Amino acid sequence: MRRAVVTLAAATALLACGSATAANGWWTFNRNTNLNSTLTWKWTYPPSPAQYSHSWRAGSGSSANECRRGEGWLPAGWYAQWGHWNHYEGSAIRGRVWWVQDKYCRDGVTKRTELFIHSEETASNGQSCTSTYDDPFCWEREADYYSLGCMKLARPSPVAGFPNDLGSAHSYYHTYGGSSEHGDLPNDAYELYVFS
Amino acid sequence: MAMVAFAGCGDGEQEQARSHPAAPSLPGLYSVGARIFGLPGGPVRLAEPPVTPLAGWLTPAAVPSADGRYLAYNSWRELRHDDPKLSWPDQGIEPGDALATPSIRLYDSRAGTDDVLAEGAFSLAWRADGALAYFKGAERDYRAGLSYVGDVIVRPSLEGAPEVWSSEPGRYIVVGWAGTRLIAYSEHEGEALDLVVFDGPGQMRVLAADSALVAISPNGRQAFVEQGPAQGRPTVRVLELETAREVAALDLTRVDAAVGWVGYAGDWRADRVVASSTSGLAVFHITPGKISLQKALRVAASSVAEPRFVGSSGLHVRAWTSVRRGGVFLECDFTVGACDRTMPLPEARGVHGFPSWRRPLYNPSRPLGTS
């Protein structure tokens, strides 16, 4: 796990501000490798321009070609966030998730769709670890950072001791400038920037 | 036409001019923007460029009819520009705003006509007897923040009445016919793909969950499917289409590490299958009950797509990749372990806001006389 430490200035600012409700936050994603990239939650306390941040290791895709649907990592650019759920119950993705908009990839033709920030957990935020190799709702191993295109954060499970990065990101999001709301949030101002 | 040779092994997209005894040839049928080359009557310009934004190259951009007279192709008309650098709110795009209309168009080389076959539709499969299948959206337009759901439609012929084959609306991508069975994807959150088979109207079953199709066997009875590292141990399998029974499998962690894992949209000719791989291309040998890796080839390109065999040796393959100037065709020779690249019409400009897009056009359905 890699964490960018919140600076002393940030800590001081938090103490000075007391409440974090006035914060303004957004995500950034630095693509390094499919297995080891960096998701960051950044925030400010307007009108101060000082930025504070916390980062987690995250995976995305199984290919560095952002145009490969179902394989490539998240395309570069700004994204709107379209929803956040604590108990999402999809067929392939469950639990604590953030849904982001569709995006043309760099070829200008291929559209990537159905993109999320998520982990491997059940809708009730638990773990379902039953099979001999890979359960879709159990974080067992390093390879679970691979995705079909989404960004994935680790979490602990009964069979592996990964850090609770999903829980941490969820907490930072709600505490430091993310929306307190859940569900479809089509006018959500909380955005994501994916670096080239 | 510009021809640039490049070394078969290496990193990145660095081009190296080098002489080569045989200039690379082009795919039999291919597109450069809206221009189509390889049709019997010579090059033509279509009304729209064949593109598949909602499918990538999970399915061909255009499919020729078995007799070569027609070309059915995917088009995408933007109703408003969507700048990938900006978020939708920053462009004033609101939830539910109509962004584009996908359509399937039909070019008739005999009549010289180019008309919409199905509006609000994309991804198609054309059977040897003329039956045509495609996905049709419940709504005509693709809208911001809404999944583009719809049904799988089959027409027995171009003039035949459309029939709904899916039992419920979903996000389907049609790929090809395997005999009388239709192969498609059912897409879920995160671009998760289940490979499904339609045995007839209302008769859909999952052939391989969390898997993608590399190719249909020449006789149309089997499918070569792949599973990447996001779903467990990277694996390729041969499945009987009638029963979904696995007849052969290969754990890709136990072969040449250069393979890594393989991608969808490859080709199956006789007893060989070619697929894109992590480092380039891989050719597999299929025997009863067994898949073995025959050759792996490192390709100096960011990603190789839609490899297809050329000739009967099973060692010559054509594919394409993307570079900054657009799509580039590759011709790869496994006997010498190298690929040459060809960029037809490098001066070509984009059409309707799309960059100049070069892709081979083919029919992945089997059995079929043309490909």
Image (cartoon, coloured by chain):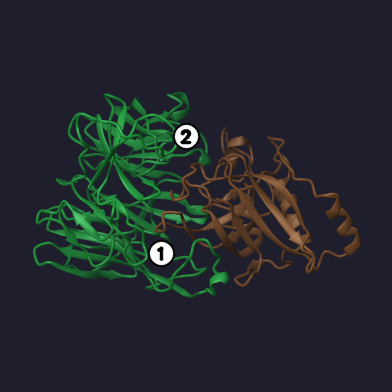
| Residue B170 drawn above or below residue A131 | below
The disc label shown at residue B168, or none:
1
x then y, percent, for residue B180: 23, 51
Is residue B60 depicted above or below A102 in this figure? Answer: above
Residue A77 at x, y = what percent?
A: 55, 58
Q: Position of residue A121 (x, y in %)?
A: 64, 48
Q: Name the element at disc 2.
A: loop
Chain coloured brown in this rendering: A
Residue toward you, A5 or B160: A5
Label 1 secondary element: loop
Q: Is residue A18 visible?
A: no
Q: Name the residue under label 2.
A: B234
Residue type at mark 1: give it.
Glu
Quote the CA–CA distance across marks 2 and 1: 31 Å
Discs 2, 1: same chain: yes
**Number of the front mark, 2 or 1:** 2
* Amino acid residing under circle 2: Pro
Q: Which chain carries label 2?
A: B
Q: In which quarter of the image is residue B101?
A: bottom left
Which chain, by letter, is green?
Answer: B
Q: Name the residue: 80% across, 65% down.
A: A48
